[in-house]
Amino acid sequence: MKIGIITSGGDAPGMNAAIRSVVRSAIANDIEVLGYTHGYQGVIDNDFTHLDSRAVGNIVQRGGTIIKTGRCMEFMKEAGRTKAANNLKTEGVEALVVVGGDGSMAGAQLLTKEHGIKCVGLPGTIDNDIWGSDLTIGFDTALNTALDAIDRIRDTATSHDRIFIVEVMGRDSGFLAIEVGVAGGAEQVFIPENPVKIDDAIDHIKKGMASGKKSHILIAAEGKKPGRGYDLAESIRKKTSWDPKVCVLGHVQRGGAPSARDRVLASRMGSAAIEALMHNQTG
């Protein structure tokens, strides 16, 4: 049996651990693995490498993904998916393991529906927004990375009696913002799922000040596009005499060595993917 594996969309810490687990579990069951580069684009371009045990050695602790990743606009079109499917069939690939977020999972679903390619999806995204998954690969690491930054910002905010707005990733999902807000003791958290009126946010800050609170940390999920933190700060400036400082954590949340939890989660999911394939439990 021969299978392919891709990492698709935004990178997430733990993807390498997932690749390692898939490859070594596959080899243990006499399954050959092709690693396609840059996500679905690699499948369309038929750009792959043969992955063996040595190829995935010493990567469990590394962030990023050794087979690269990316978003593929060509795959969003039927012609692109047809080309990808034909390449897989030509190479004798019987199934594709997809590690990625919601867009990557949707792509795998279309590949199965339109061309009968068996797919197994592993939820890998720092957004933690894959339906049916309690925890996605990369979320725990991103959470701890953001928390470390917020703890440091808290020190300077307290020293200067300042209001800080910290923008975290997550796109349309507020999971990362909520959890880092709770863990970091933030005064307020702004998420796409529950919009807050600016006047209510200001009133909350005023109440804190009246009770003796000198500094405030506000966490803002980025929403559909980055810059939410700056928009929030400007709205506060227009209605008050305050000058909130903004810190956009950005892509630092995607990088770095995966946490122990993400390494274990990714390893378990990789092994489960091969088991699912062997029992014909695919999309």
Image: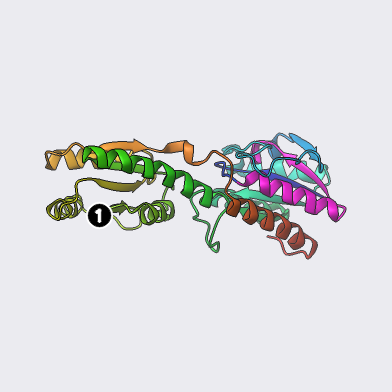
- Pick the front one: 9 or 30: 30
- Pick the front one: 21 or 42: 21
Say which residue appears at 58% left-offset and 41% top-offset.
257
Q: Is residue 228 visible?
A: no
Residue 147 lies in the magenta stretch: no
- Residue 101 picture location, percent across and down: 55, 50
Per the image, the residue denoted by label 1 is 196
Residue 25 lies in the magenta stretch: yes
Q: Is residue 9 visible?
A: yes
Say which residue appears at 54% left-offset and 38% top-offset.
255
Q: In what quadrant of the picture does the C terminus appear? A: bottom right
- Pick the front one: 15 or 281: 15
Name the residue type under label 1: Val
- Pick the front one: 84 or 11: 11
- The quarter of the displayed image where residue 225 is located: top left
- The quarter of the displayed image where residue 195 is located: bottom left
**Dot 1: what SS?**
loop
Judge from the rendering whether residue 193 lies leftward or rightward of residue 209; answer left or right: right
Give the residues in magenta: 14-41
Judge from the rendering whether residue 13 lies leftward or rightward of residue 3; answer left or right: left
- Residue 31 picture location, percent across and down: 84, 51
Say which residue appears at 71% left-offset and 57% top-offset.
273
Q: How is the image coloured?
A: rainbow
- Residue 23 picture location, percent across and down: 77, 48
- The quarter of the displayed image where residue 232 is located: top left
Say which residue appears at 20% left-offset and 52% top-offset.
201
